[in-house]
Image (cartoon, rainbow, N blue to C red):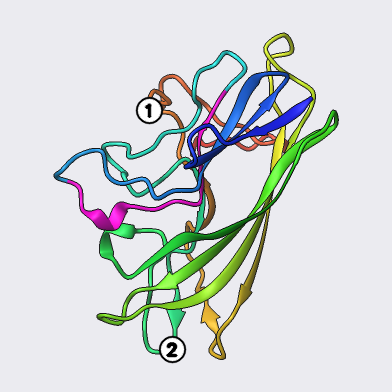
Amino acid sequence: WVTVHDPDGRTLEVQVRGEKVLRYNCAPVPPPQDDLPESLTRNAYLHPVWAPSGRSVTDDYSPDHPHQRGIFFAWTETRFEDRTPDFWNLVEGTGTVRLKGLGEQFEGPVFGGFRAFHEHVDLSIPGEEQVVLEETWNVRVYGFGGRNLGFFLFDITSEQTNVTSSPLILPEYHYGGMAVRGARDWTPERLQVRTSSGSTDRFE
């Protein structure tokens, strides 16, 4: 059975038969250190995401990339009107992604989860902001797997709409979109990524 919990009024936590699978950050998460800029504060992302062993497989405010936050969606290279807001590199302060509101939450024996509504905000005009994209996340956690089987299964569907009269242009770039900041101990010596087609993260 998949259940959705609100343990502290700041997060949503989805569990399968009492085992934690993922946590969605509803409230803004400020920097944990005084030497990090406040512009890194954001919400609307998943962290922690847990393996069946109970270990987190995501990271937040990692020392080398503090703007990469668990599982998140952000565009990097953009052109909007005469500006270039960056919704990914938050430290620049030209863009961000935030929670607009929560939708339905659902539970059951087959799947459970929630719907969340995000805003991608252009902050590149001094003293002003403009919502460029409205995004809907549908997060669905399936009611099988767990500690005995060694896996959990969930999916995220993102639907985005430009709510302005100007186009948001996304030039070809080598990253941006849905991303995962892996656990801090996922070093090249300890981890290799392989896709269903056999591709890896190793380059010849």
Q: Camera-side residue: 161 or 10?
A: 10
Q: Do the residues labelled 2 and 1 touch (CB within 8 Å)?
A: no
Q: What element carries label 2?
A: loop
Residue bounds of the magenta highlight = 36-50
Q: Which residue position holds label 1?
A: 184
| Residue 92 occupies quadrant | bottom left
Image mark for residue 81: 2
The reply to whether residue 34 is visible in this rendering is: yes
Q: Camera-side residue: 57 or 36?
A: 36
The N terminus is located in which quarter?
top right
| Place of residue 57 in the rendered image (x, y in percent of width and height, measured from the top left) | 51, 27
Q: What residue type is labelled 2?
A: Glu
Q: What residue type is labelled 1?
A: Arg
Q: Which residue lies furthest to the top in this view?
A: 148
| Place of residue 78 in the rendered image (x, y in percent of width and height, measured from the top left) | 45, 74
Q: Compared with residue 95, is residue 36 higher up or lower down, i.e. above or below?
A: above
| Place of residue 111 in the rendered image (x, y in percent of width and height, measured from the top left) | 80, 35
x 51%, y 77%: residue: 132
Image mark for residue 4: none
x 21%, y 53%: residue: 37
x 75%, y 20%: residue: 145
User: In the visual, does 122 lie left or right of 110?
Assistant: left
User: In the visual, does 72 lie left or right of 69?
Assistant: right
Q: What element carries label 1?
A: loop
x 26%, y 80%: residue: 127
